[in-house]
Amino acid sequence: DVKVTQSSRYLVKRTGEKVFLECVQDMDHENMFWYRQDPGLGLRLIYFSYDVKMKEKGDIPEGYSVSREKKERFSLILESASTNQTSMYLCASRVAAVTDTQYFGPGTRLTVL
Amino acid sequence: AQKVTQAQTEISVVEKEDVTLDCVYETRDTTYYLFWYKQPPSGELVFLIRRNSFDEQNEISGRYSWNFQKSTSSFNFTITASQVVDSAVYFCALSEGGYSGAGSYQLTFGKGTKLSVIP
């Protein structure tokens, strides 16, 4: 079974704080993803990593950065959290090819006050 | 550009009724993959099925079935004898398979259909 875990299910932070969201997969997948999900807007890709230390911007990278130092771990960083980053954040991983299935973690519901 | 449309925003059915969730897609590629995911209230997106563009056979898995029709660019999902545990948001998604490797990442999701099964 593919297992993708996220460090927190719920997180509350204050405006201006630096926030780290962690994602770990145990299936030796090459690719990992960060999405945010908002009502009415669906899922939007923030960043994508196709290998260790490699990353690409998705559709909405502004205000976020990522880190992938090890294959199994992909971190999303909010350098200075703002209220408009209150959202559900979903991490996913897949083997390697675009045709492969993406498997998702349980999500982190982040509230920025 | 690829696009996925799930025209039904919300559906309510009574338990044991059958329900079909519609998915219409747009793509210029001849090679592509279609997916369905389920998102229960807990929030996790659960993978249900993947289908490639060269396989138009319908698929059945227990109470779930999928009808893929290239002629109408549709990949509809039917739940037979619905149960309360089927209550969730269901997402259809598309990836174009003509290119893979670094930089190839697009999985386009529809906006989702919220299914409520009433006891």
Image (spheres, coloured by chain):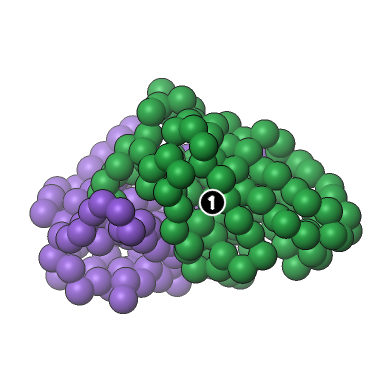
Chain colours: A green, B purple
B1 over B88 or under it: above or below: below
The image quadrant where one finds the C terminus of chain B is: top right
The quadrant holding residue B110 is bottom left
Residue shown at 55% from the left, 55% from the top:
A35
Residue B58 percent across, percent down from the top left: 19, 48
- Horizontal side of B25 relative to B114 (left or right) equals left
Residue shown at 28% from the left, 73% from the top:
B26
Using the rendered image of the protein, determine whether residue B5 is visible from the camera's viewpoint: yes
The foreground one among A69 and B34 is A69
- Horizontal side of B73 relative to A23 (left or right) equals left
Residue A91 percent across, percent down from the top left: 54, 45
The quadrant holding residue A108 is top right
A16 over A66 or under it: above or below: below
Q: Amino acid at mark 1?
A: Trp
Q: How many numbered circles does the render carry?
A: 1
Q: Which residue is mark 1?
A: A34
The image quadrant where one finds the N terminus of chain B is: bottom left
Residue shown at 13% from the left, 65% from the top:
B30
Helix, strand or loop at disc 1?
strand
Using the rendered image of the protein, determine whether residue B111 is visible from the camera's viewpoint: no
The foreground one among A20 and A85 is A20
Crowding at dot 1, Cα within 10 Å, few <14 / some 14-19 / many 20+, comes out as: many
The foreground one among A11 and A71 is A71
- Horizontal side of B83 relative to A28 (left or right) equals right
Subunit of label 1 = A
Residue shown at 77% from the left, 60% from the top:
A80
Residue A61 percent across, percent down from the top left: 57, 65
Residue A104 percent across, percent down from the top left: 49, 41
A84 over B59 or under it: above or below: below
- Horizontal side of A111 relative to A93 (left or right) equals right
A110 over A42 or under it: above or below: above
